[in-house]
Image: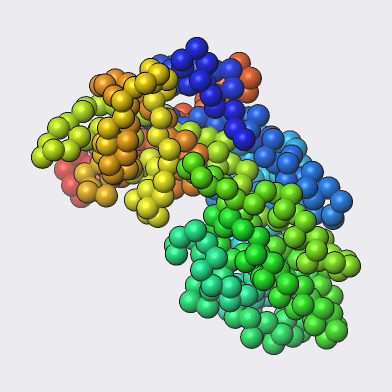
Amino acid sequence: MHHFDYRNGVLHCEGVSLETIAREVGTPAYVYSDATLRRHYQVLADAFADVNCLIAYAVKANSNLGVIATLASLGAGADVVSGGELMKAMAAGVPANRIVFSGVAKSEAEMELGLERGIHQFNVESMPELHRLSRVAQRMGKTARMAFRVNPHVEAAGGHAHISTGGAGDKFGIAWHEALAFYDEAKKLPGVEPVGVGCHIGSQIFRVAPFKEAWTKVVGLVRQLRERGVGITRVDFGGGLGVPYKPGDDPDSPAVYAAQAREVLGDLDVELILEPGRLIAGNAGVLISRVEYIKQRDGRTFVMLDAGFNDLIRPALYSAHHEIIPVLKPADGASYAPVDLVGPVCESTDRFAKDRPMPPLEEGQLVAFMTAGAYGATLSSQYNTRPLVAEALVRGNDYAVVRRRPTFEDMIALERAPDWISGG
């Protein structure tokens, strides 16, 4: 469920017209719904209300300060994969003791930052990382509470090969058959304390069956480790439950997801950590864009938008589908015809949809990319020297700009020509 709907023929986010935001903020622009973010977090929290559970929002899905702060106000922790995400989470009000630091290539500086702040847990992904964490923690006189991210070899769990992370060929995690030896090593090292076992098998997974397979292996590993004297008190089940992007998508609900987790955990006395991202932010956001031109050529119709794949790369990167709808509601009985919806970036892959049935569109008309709240703004770039997209957060009948669009002067000010060039 989300809070985007037509009112008096105009698409609104809660009580605010997207026409108003486009006029005042400009386009392209991301627009997020406070009510949707809150509802999605609360539905998940309620589903796990009877479980000792840390919901660590996956900041990589949408790292806007306003979004993180909204979730932090509800009690969410944060799953971060960089020092920048850690600092942003804390700036947004997430306590350090509710932050989990994941990621495959943490630098010494990032480890130092996490240790200085006293984060809840490091999710370690290799033996070299474990030894580095031990050295850094020992040098600082700290103890790093850690879990290995174990790759359970659950193949092709995600909705696309590029977002499946639990197979033997994926770069994430330690190999399943190495887990016992790795924990034995961690138990001996100074500066680290193995307290958990984690896994994350991929993203945009509609059914709980792959989760059950992976989680069952994790729970079995916890029992083995305890028998070997490793004091495991936490399990991190990751995230990955899918959201609907198009009609017909019907992922299992958070209630089904939670019921499966409780069944697998059984009587295992642990803190459960979850890392939802897309599940919370996905359909809490849209990208609004304006039609620049309608171009007819070789029997095709190209609708050229002011948003490019530097603003929303998912279709180019994953062949991902986003529903694209006019901000002004089409007339009843409007005829639909296939068009290609493309952007202004100088790349052939700057195409959002091919042969997409759309109602008649005109220059200057606004469209909205639905379910764009996750992996939209966070994956954006300034390719073609295009400014990053502005972001707005709506609450009821009001909205705030939570990231302003940089000016060309802002962008140029970050760079300089070297002194040896005349005028540099």
Q: In the orientation shown, which residue stands out farthest toward the top? A: 8
Q: Residue 170, how many percent across, how many down?
A: 50, 72
Q: In the orientation shown, which residue stands out farthest toward the left? A: 298
Residue at 76% over, 69% down? 196
Q: Residue 142, how many percent across, how many down?
A: 76, 67
Residue 406 vertical position relative to residue 182 in the rendered view, above or below: above
In front: 32, or 181?
Answer: 32
Residue at 50% over, 29% down? 31
Is there any visible trace of residue 290 in the rendered image?
no
Residue 162 vertical position relative to residue 53 in the rendered view, above or below: below
Q: Residue 413, how many percent across, how many down?
A: 35, 37
Residue 111 placement, left or right of 384: right
Residue at 77% over, 56% down? 259
Hey, which quadrant is residue 194 in on the image? bottom right
User: Exactly how many numbered labels are in the figure?
Assistant: 0
Residue 104 placement, left or right of 142: left
In front: 368, or 323?
Answer: 323
Q: Quadrant of the C terminus?
A: top left
Residue at 76% over, 42% down? 75
Q: Quadrant of the N terminus?
A: top right
Residue 313 placement, left or right of 266: left
Q: Residue 304, how many percent across, how many down?
A: 25, 33
